[in-house]
Amino acid sequence: MKLQQVSDQDLVKFYIGGDESVIEELLRRHKSKIFTSIYLLVKDQYLAEDIFQDAFIKVINTLRSGRYNEEGKFLPWVMRIAHNLVIDYFRKEKRTPTITSADGTDVLNLIQIHEESAEERMLRDQTHIDLRKMIQFLPDEQKEVLIMRHYADLSFKEIAELTDVSINTALGRMRYALSNLRKMMNVKEVSISRG
């Protein structure tokens, strides 16, 4: 039996059944696509290699524990694991995303940075913290596009390819994400002014 002709789904079944050698074939098939998608996000080869290894360790652990249940969708499942690890990395680094409005201005920089008083600086810092928290409340696909666009500085074409959607869908998700963030900010302002 030639492993190259066996489907991902069957290879996963063989692996779960105890044939450890088939993991190499799954790796060979998908390494470049998964690694490239991580690299495009983090733009650092060594970091991308670390995250790729972490992703495959997670894949192996999930398969061994019997928790894998993605019927015939091995690659999208691994890509999701890898993207989540990238997002976790950015979260740990606490990189502040730049969020641009429709006219191209950075929403975070709308707060004029002049000779700030301590009170103004605290308010600005709080706004950044609030914005990062609000991003976590977005639906996953909106959060993903927002993070890829502003944390990883990817083009909408790259985002569309990585998430396997059309450019219009990626743009739409970004529009909804920014719209939802604006609504959340408005609600927060109203609750503060009433407080």
Image: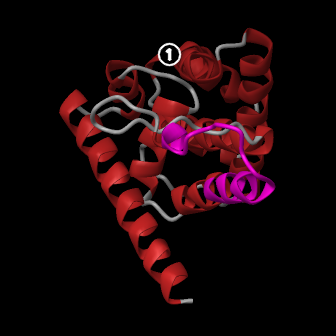
Magenta stretch encompasses residue 111? yes
Q: Is residue 19 visible?
A: no
Colour style of the rendered protein structure = secondary structure
Q: Name the quadrant of the C terminus.
A: bottom right
- The answer to whether 38 is drawn above or below residue 8 in the figure is above
Residue matched to label 1: 4
The stretch in magenta equals: 108-127
Task: Tell me residue 118's x, y (percent).
Answer: 80, 54
Dividing the picture into quarters, in which one does residue 130 lie?
A: bottom right
Q: Nearer the viewer, residue 26 or 1?
A: 26
- What residue do we see at 58% from left, 45% from top? 13
Q: Is residue 185 left or right of residue 30?
A: left
Residue found at x 46% / y 34%:
106
Q: Nearer the viewer, residue 105 or 116?
A: 116
List x then y, in percent, for residue 72.
42, 44
Packing grade of label 1 (10 A; few <14, some 14-19, many >=20) is few
Would you say 171 lies left or right of 65 here?
A: left
